[in-house]
Amino acid sequence: MSELSDQELATLWAVADVLVPATEGMPALRDADARAEWLDRALAADPGLVDDLQRVLAAIQGGDVSATVRGLFVSVRRDFDVLATVVTGTYYLIPQVRRLIGYPGQSRNPPRLEEAAEQLEDLLEQATSRPSFYRPTPSRPTGP
Amino acid sequence: MTSVPSAPELADVLVVGAGPSGAVVAAELAGRGFSVVCLEQGRWFNNDEFPGSKVEWEVLAERRWSRDQNVRRRPDDYPVEVSDSEITPIMFAGVGGSSLIYGGHWMRLLPSDFRMRTLDGVADDWPLTYEDLSPYYDALDAAVGVSGLAGDPAYPPGMNPPLPPHPIGRVGRRAAMALNSLGWHWWPAPNAIASHRYGELAPCARWGTCETGCPEGAKGSFDLTHWPRALKSGAKLITGARVHRITTNKRGLADGALYFDREGREHRQRAQMVVLAANGVGTPRLLLLSASTLFPDGLANSSGLVGKRLMLHPNAVVTGIYEEDLQSWLGPAGQLIHSLEFYETDLSRGFAGGAKLDVTPTGGPMRVLDLHGEAAFDQLWGPAVHERVRTTLGHTVHWGIMANDLPEESNFISLDPELKDSDGIPAPKSHYVVSENSWRLLRFNMERVREVNTAAGAIGIVDEEVGPCAAGHLLGTACMGDDPRTSVVNAWGVSHDVPNLRIVDGSAMTTGGAVNPTATITALALRSAVQLATNARWQEVPE
């Protein structure tokens, strides 16, 4: 379970509703990560974020979340970036979200043996037909 | 003081730093029978530690695996004070050094880079030529397993990468088609990333995460390409060893180094010759820390140029957005294609020097949002965020523009009077202002890249001008030259002041060119090591 308290988690979900809201076709973070398991993974990947996050959430709690987040964007960018990193860092880990945006994640994609040559064969003639254009320089022999 | 039992008490050669140039020197000299000890402040890393194969890759890359040591804040790294620097110099402490997190763009300088004063009337000529360095470039190409294609018309003939090029992907094809339509140069880019199995290197699996370490073991980082050979030949590598002083004897010869281990104990390693391979920030820091009665302004600093002439290669990025799905996250990353169309100086453009243009993968959704970081709130967040990701992720051609920043004494490394590393040693401070020449150069080339994107059918173009950014090309701070009054080392990297002290990292570069420097740094290091071995019998030594 998340290192965040229930109140902190509720505030974070509200921040996420501002930054990456539910739209037709895209879920809210609070729904896509209902058990906060992906949030835990994001925070575990960057434990140094937790203290900063809790500090920023404490400053937001109880107020108008949308107005506060917008205010941080304009005037305290460092704090805004903490929120944005946690929210997007979590949101785009979620397999459901990755499927929806068509991002497979970084993964092993060894090319076929012929792939490099196939990708060059209709393009390279023009590049190879260009004469050399480096500027030659006078040499100065300096053997060991 | 504690001795290190497994290291020779008196080494023939002490190397400071186990990054690319230190690895090359250690492997070459140990292979020729010299007793070699290398002191490295970092540790070994293995492929499983790198975040690229983990689902949290982008989160991990934000801080724990940031390329910026000031963000990463590992105890092995030292901080760099940057309050007076428009660009943050970045590096990585570990066996293999910053090659663990480099992109492997394996580029040679061009012949004209060695003759900027003669050809363009700016900066300085090197005390050697492209032709002098060419055999060593060839040797390094073979050692690191460069993948590429021979025949690039931007270069003299003779470059023959040992491995075929990587697929350039949909991204590279889109860029190449546009460059063809404009009649501009491009070439399948050379990378120190194995396209096929090669020695210790696995074939690239296109994770696209090269700059946070290769999880596949396919990238030519020097922990893989050189350290196994160096160790097999008898070199002794001591990790967790942070050097804080090069010691000298009464005759002014280097005779060893003092270092702290990870428990904070101080040790001394004695040596007949000392080779500094601690990068363009670490080396001047160490020389300045080594001031003494004999060398009151810092070791090897009679010219006053130690730390001066810092070059960092200011970068700009211009990204085209396309309707077509280009799979822009697909590796290698690495460069897909490069263009040197605007590399050579043309003073009619209003600036000296030029730029390398390269096309690379863009990354995942967090990077995509970062691309749009200058947008207003309602154009980036809220419902707009989904549209941004839908239209941008996987649909980009990401162009890097690397500027040839000329050496200027007003850009320099000093010792910070307050900031210290985890051993209490003064941290380096970077002083760097992007020059008017660099700004003109960058803006000219950004305009050219916009033209390419337009020719390629981009539906949107996003600019990222140089700003408070990071640069890993740390060059020029102990420059090479013939005249001891205007340079720190000679054409072999030997200090003008201390005849048994060599500098083999990016510090020694007279000018920086506009290409990724590791090929040049390591070729210079190999050339210096061969010359050291050839001339060792005449070398003046302390004992």
Image (cartoon, coloured by chain):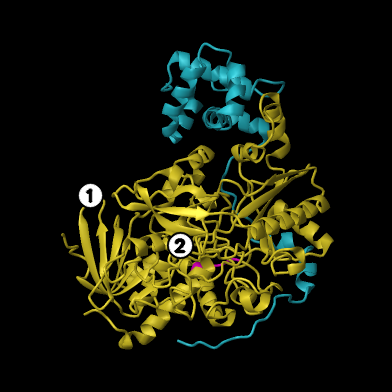
Chain colours: A cyan, B yellow
Q: Dot 2 corresponds to which residue? A: B280
* Occupied quadrant, residue B407: bottom right
- For image coordinates 52% across by 17% down, the residue present is A60
In this rendering, position of residue B463 left or right of residue B366? right
For this rendering, which residue is in front, B392 or A144?
Answer: A144
- Whole-percent x and y of residue A59? 49, 18
Q: Which residue is mark 1?
A: B263
Residue B392 on the magenta segment: no
Q: Which residues are magenta?
A: B143-147
Q: Chain of mark 1?
A: B
Query: Is B203 or B238 nearer to us in this picture?
Result: B238
Say above or below: B124 vs A56. below
Which residue type does callout 2 highlight? Gly
Q: Residues within 10 Å of mark 1 (few under 14, many from 20)?
A: few
Q: Main secondary structure of the magenta part?
A: loop
- Where residue B9 appears, x then y in whole percent? 19, 70
Q: Position of residue B501 (x, y in %)?
A: 35, 74
Residue placed at 38% from the left, 63% from the top? B18
Q: Chain of mark 2?
A: B
Q: Residue at x 65, y 52 (%)?
A: B316
Could you tell me if residue A31 is visible in this image?
A: no
Element carrying mark 2 = helix
Quarter of the view holding residue A117: bottom right
Instruction: Give the mark toward the camera: 1 or 2.
Output: 2
Query: Going from the N terminus, do you reach mark 1 or mark 2 first?
Result: 1
Write the residue at 28% across / 76% down. B252
Would residue B266 be found to the left or right of residue B242 on screen? left
Q: Amino acid at mark 1?
A: Glu
